[in-house]
Amino acid sequence: MELLQGLETRYSSPKLTEPGPDATQMQHLLKAAIRAPDHGLLRPWRFITVTGEDRNKLGEVFVQARQRNQPDCNEIQLERCRQIPMRAPTLMIVVANPKPHPKVPEAEQIQSTAAAAYGILMAAYAQQLGAIWRTGWVVHDSHVRSSLGISLSEQIIAIIYLGTPLGQAIARPHLDAASLMTNWP
Ligand SMILES: Cc1cc2nc3c(=O)[nH]c(=O)nc-3n(C[C@H](O)[C@H](O)[C@H](O)COP(=O)(O)O)c2cc1C
């Protein structure tokens, strides 16, 4: 796929199935991620993958987190939490790992991590993989964070779900790009 064509047409795939990315495809995802613009070359990102049976363990962590937050929640709600990681064969958790720096504020390092997440989405699209960037309450939850080994100075920026797209892409409403740009002065 041509780079420009990919950039201009990328879309998310909310429904994903097996197979997930293979080892070579994963390498490309990571290589694309670490080309993110990185002020000061601080490498303020890291990536955690969850695949196969380990998704069930993550599902149990989500269940525990929900029970801690809402002790009276019902089995249907818990089952929904259990199933979150099963939405795709592979999850890539994108973590901002900002470093103290006199010239590069934390916000820039988080922005760099978001750019890394976008690199993963683009590299997935380029390899005909389906992908979607999700967040939700789980990325802020203290039990989920500690279970994943996220330190207090870190933030989960994205959980990218990866696999083989199922069904049609959701059509995006047409957006007139030129209408978003003005000349100054
Ligand atoms: C920071 C961030 C967080 C997001 N979190 C979610 C989410 O939790 N659930 C969800 O369905 N989509 C989420 N999205 C949106 C999807 O990734 C996707 O962009 C959206 O469904 C539009 O699809 P498109 O990328 O094909 O335009 C998030 C996007 C961003 C940038």
Image (cartoon, helix red, strand yellow):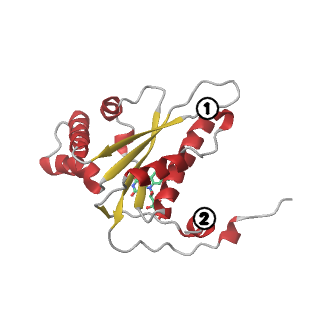
The residue drawn where x is 65% and y is 25% is 101
Q: Position of residue 79 (x, y in %)?
A: 17, 49
Residue type, mark 1 in image = Leu
Q: Residues within 10 Å of mark 2 (few under 14, many from 20)?
A: few
Q: Residue drawn 59% across and 46% down?
A: 35
Q: Position of residue 6 (x, y in %)?
A: 56, 67
Of 177 and 168, nearer the camera is: 168
Q: Residues within 10 Å of mark 1 (few under 14, many from 20)?
A: some
| Ligand number 1: quarter of image | bottom left
Front residue of 91/150: it is: 91
**Mark 2 highlights which residue?**
3
Figure check: 23 above or below 143: below
x, y percent for residue 28:
49, 52
| Mark toward the start of the polypeptide (2 vs 1) | 2
Q: SS of the residue at dot 1?
A: loop
| Left or right: 3 as drawn, with respect to 63 | right
Image-based side of 47 in relation to 62, left or right:
right
Instruction: Say which residue appears at 59% left-offset and 42% top-offset.
Output: 112
Q: Name the residue type under label 2.
A: Leu
Indicate whether 4 appears above or below 79: below
> Would you place residue 110 above or below residue 182 in this image?
above
Q: Secondary structure at mark 2?
A: helix
Front residue of this view, candidates 46 and 141: 46
Please give the name of the residue rendered at 25% of the width and 45% of the height, measured from the top-left corner: 55
Residue 87, quarter of picture: bottom left
Q: Name the residue that disc number 1 marks.
A: 42
Q: State yes or no: Cβ of the residue under disc 1 lies below 8 Å from any atom of ligand 1.
A: no
Q: In terms of image quadrants, where is residue 142?
A: top left
The quadrant in which the N terminus is found is: bottom right
Disc nearest the viewer among 2 and 1: 2
Marks 2 and 1, how far apart in space?
26 Å
Q: What residue occupies the far front of the structure in this picture? A: 24
